[in-house]
Image: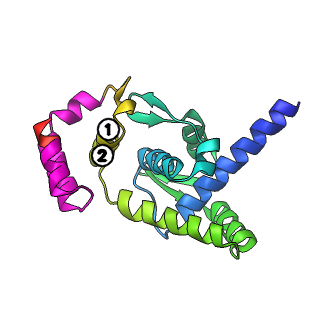
Amino acid sequence: MIAQSSLEEHIEIIERYIALLLGVEDRSIPSVYHVEKELFILSKANPNVARVLHFVPHSYGAYSDVVRNIVYDSDYVDIRNGRITLNAKGKRKFKELVKKYGDDPRFKQFLATLKMVRKIYDKLSRDELLFLMYITYPEYRENSTYYEKLIKRKKELAQSLLRKGLITKKRYEEIVKE
């Protein structure tokens, strides 16, 4: 029974991360890929998140069964036309978390990091997002069924990332030469 309790606590923590990611901005996230990859980026930036969220190389890069299942099955989340948003219950959960931890400077910094992640990655198309993940974390190309399709469009995708300010001119040139 201890293992079940621990699993439930683990899932509750991930649900909180998802609620915070969705609630930190007053707009939906473009897709489940975005939720997953934004949490992946967060796990790379925050050791506490990395202890809870685990990703494996998969067809579309870094993948988490747990994140996907929570997004699709959570009673905090609504999915409309592929876009992910908090529903009324999720918004209440977000407000509860902010009220409970809002005075903690580390929590404020965490929210600022979430806002930055949303600001950067929400504006990407699915292909731009996946391409950026593959070039930044090449170890997640393993098992990918989509990387070969994207690499055929690397110049176009790299130009788009450059235009959006997500890669430098030097990085663009490296990508195109690869």
Which of the 4 image quarters holds residue 95? bottom right
Tell which of 77 and 126 is nearer to you: 126
Q: Is residue 116 visible?
A: yes
Residue underneath mark 2? 132
Task: Report x, y in % for residue 37.
Answer: 44, 46
- Kindly state the secondary structure of the residue where label 2 is placed: helix
What is the residue that sits farthest to the right in this orientation? 1
Q: Residue at x 32, y 47 (%)?
A: 129
Which quadrant of the rendered structure holds the C terminus? Answer: top left
Question: Does 133 sit above or below residue 161?
Answer: above
Please report the residue visible at 44 percent of the width from the left and 29 percent of the height from the top: 57
Q: Nearer the viewer, residue 31 or 172?
A: 172
- Determine crowd level at label 1: few under 14, some 14-19, many 20+ residues with C-alpha closer than 10 A: many
Compared to 165, does 130 lie above or below?
Answer: above
Res. 134 mark: 1
Q: Name the residue type under label 1.
A: Tyr
Cβ atoms at labels 1 and 2 below 8 Å apart: yes
**Dividing the picture into quarters, in which one does residue 165 lie?**
bottom left
Above or below, 141 relative to 77? above
Element class at badge 1 = helix
Residue sitting farthest toward the bottom: 103
Q: Main secondary structure of the magenta part?
A: helix
CA–CA distance in space, label 1 to label 2? 5 Å
Left or right of 127 in this view: 159: left
Quarter of the figure that contains the N terminus = top right
Boundaries of the magenta span: 146-174
